[in-house]
Amino acid sequence: MFKQFYDEASSTLTYLIADMESKQAVLIDPVKENIDEYLNIINAHQLTLVYSLETHVHADHITGGGQLKTITTAKTAVSQACGADSADMQLKDNDVITFGHEKITVIATPGHTAGSVSFLWRDRVFTGDSLLINGCGRTDFQSGDAGKLYDCITGKLFMLPDETLVYPGHDYNSRRVSSIGQEKLINPRLANQTRDEFIYTMANLNLPKPKMIDIAVPANRKCGVPEPQQG
């Protein structure tokens, strides 16, 4: 089973993958405000949520991972380079996450943030903000590095088969899926661009600061659940 969710406020794409024989499931990049929507699907199909996976520490929304853990006992998982010490699993490059008869392989894709990862499942790669449809994530905060992002996209993601489906963490133009072959061919930031050209482009985007960054990043380092107040 595979389902894609869309959060209107942050243009975030969330993914549910389930092994229908074991009824075990994972969520990728859940949004806190949409937990009830996820649980409705999970309960309707009698699934057990075993993992809540993050592609990185987000700056534009608060994750639902920590709250889902309290409701479902699902383990939270974030790259060890994210600084999210409260996560149950600190992911590394080439780690394999298993649930039922399915497996997801972790691909470290730093550049948007130092701890960005992508998740490869069957013929699909969930790229978070590293590779977007006709774009890529910005590299001007959270230890971003345009050179590293270029190297990861061209040296790892673009090495996947062209028919691999690309499911990004966001889209702002009502698109939902692409492919590695398409992004190699027509992505304006990457197609036929040298590393130096890419770095120059990323350095001159002049994007506004994300509205929620000062709230979202600290919260997401705690998997979206604040520490209890003393007193």
Image (cartoon, rainbow, N blue to C red):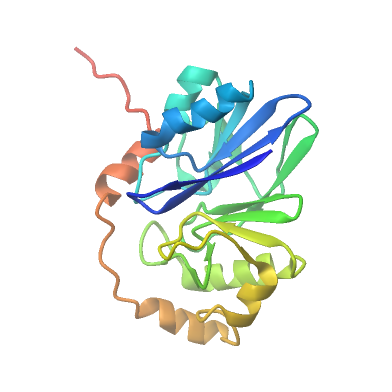
124 relative position to 13: left or right: right
Residue lying at the far front in this picture: please name it: 44
Residue occupying image coordinates x 38% and y 56%: 142
Residue occupying image coordinates x 59% and y 56%: 167
Whether 147 is drawn above or below 81: the answer is below
Q: For residue 143, which quarter of the picture?
A: bottom left
The one of 129 and 117 positioned closer to us in this rendering:
129
How many numbered markers are drawn?
A: 0
Q: Where is residue 101 in the image (x, y as percent from the top left)?
A: 80, 33
Q: Using the rendered image of the protein, determine whether residue 175 is visible from the camera's viewpoint.
A: yes
Residue occupying image coordinates x 45% and y 48%: 6
Whether 4 is drawn above or below 140: the answer is above
Residue occupying image coordinates x 39% and y 54%: 11
Q: Where is residue 222 in the image (x, y as percent from the top left)?
A: 39, 33
The one of 121 and 221 positioned closer to us in this rendering:
121
Give the quadrant of the N terminus: top right
The one of 106 and 175 positioned closer to us in this rendering:
175
